[in-house]
Amino acid sequence: MHETNLSPSRKIPVREQLSYSLFEFALNPLYTIYASFLVYFYTDIIGVDAGIVGVLILLSKVFDGVSDFFAGSIIDHTHTRHGSARPWILRIAIPLFIAYIITFTVPGVSDIGKIVYIFISYNVSQAVIYTMADATANALPTYMTIDPNTRSSSYAFRLLVAVFVQMGFSAVYLNVVELLGGGQMGYIWSAAILGGISIVALLLAFGGTKEAVRTMESGADDVPVWTAVKALFHNKYWFMALGINFCSVLHQVATLTVGIYYAKYILNDAKLVGMLTLYHHIPATIAMLGLPFVLSKGASKRNLTMLSAVIMLAGSLVSVFYSTGMPFVISIGLRGFGYGIVAAVFQGMIADTIEYGEWKTGVRAQGVTVSAGGAGQKLGAGVGTALLGLYLAFSGYDGMAQVQSASAISAIRICFIFVPIIIYLATLVLGYFFKLDKQYPQIVAELEERHRGA
């Protein structure tokens, strides 16, 4: 079996938490490209049909979700002098640079050739390379310490940096592409620059962190991926944390993805979507600024999750009565502030389920446990976006029409105002039953006793 040194007394220093947050300078630009700019690049720059692009990405998400489990298992099976997760920071640096480049180097061939290239390059860059890099980032704090407070604080620091990187990158990216010549070459040159920045960021993250929770070989094989996945099905708190993350992603779809439709057809100006995003993101950032310090002091992640649900629910209830004006702005701000809280605590919650899973099943699979959370996030985004599209189509929405039908307008209102109420109520219920915070110290104590006995 494997001997696990839990090192419970170690606290992650702030400088290490900041070094860990540098992951976002490598990962977030690529994530934002996938989320916001890639479809536009495929359709308007390369000239591929939007419907075909949608089908390609939908099919790719299936493989993309499954790959998270294998990425986590690879980390669990890694044992070097640098640890289990840290070696992959170096190993993934050059492949991540390549992922940036191949995303935009679609050859000027026939439409079939472009479609084949897009499908292959998207899966290699997103489902293989990016997934491995993201799995490394998610797993690393669980190898740095089992202290739930500074571990959660590290995740919150990283998320805070992610918000700033995403906001700044989104604001200037297309302008940078134009400065670099525009067209496909502008995207390729920008990818080369971003890939270079990612290498530097990963080198700094590697140098500024260290692993203290070591799993050392003592004669038996590592936990097979299917054994680790099977053990997850006995981890009730993992499912609750995954459900909370699923609701969080659905919130983003209902608030941000639907936001452009709400701005165009309810507020009568599609450009107002930028203001809606700011009304949401600024309060979310304010919430995230305080979370690392609150979590480092031992605040209950369960209570913070329930608080976030109540705040977001209040925001939605305000928008039921006020669909425009200052009260509406406040309602969006409340939804953003609540989202900032739950987004900052989720990764710490999923990390805490590692020790619960080992205590419950005897199987410790850190990489698989935290990486599977990424699968839930992708599932939430895929399901949410698909349901939105189907519901709008069912309601008679026509993107080429100048004026939408009453049923389509009603569907947009329902998706933006009423669907989130259900999401926030579900978050509240899941948070209520997530009682791991109180059990955690006793679980760690019992695990220590087991290890000493072994």
Image (spheres, grey):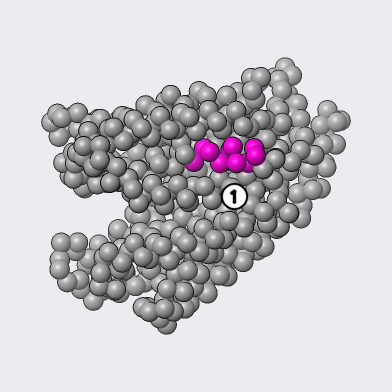
Residue at the (36%, 32%) spot, across then down = 193
* Residue placed under numbered mark 1 in the picture: 156
- Which corner quadrant of the image does residue 119 belong to? top left
Rendering coords of residue 160 (x, y %): 54, 50
In this view, the residue in front, 160 or 428, is 160
Q: Residue at x 45, y 47 (%)?
A: 165
Left or right relative to 383: residue 411: left
Q: Nearer the viewer, residue 385 or 309?
A: 309
Q: Amino acid at mark 1?
A: Ala
Q: Position of residue 37 (x, y in %)?
A: 30, 46
- What residue sits 39% from the left and 61% below the top? 277
**Outermost residue toward the left in this view:** 110
Q: Is residue 339 visible?
A: no
Q: Does residue 17 sit above or below 398 in this rendering?
A: above
- The image position of residue 449, as x and y in percent, is 85, 36
Element under disc 1: helix
| In the rendered image, the vertical position of residue 140 relative to residue 345, given as above or below | above
Q: Main secondary structure of the magenta part?
A: helix
Left or right placement of residue 56 versus residue 284 in this view: left
* Residue 127 pos. (x, y %): 41, 34
Magenta span includes 267: no
Which residue is pictured at 52% across the width and 47% down the height?
A: 161
Label 1, residues with CA under 10 Å away: few <14, some 14-19, many ≥20: many
The picture quadrant where one finds residue 62 is top left
The outermost residue toward the bottom is 321
In the depicted structure, whether residue 132 falls above or below residue 331 = above
Position of the N terminus by quadrant: top right
Q: Range of the magenta residues?
A: 15-24
| Horizontal side of residue 141 vs 173, given as left or right | right
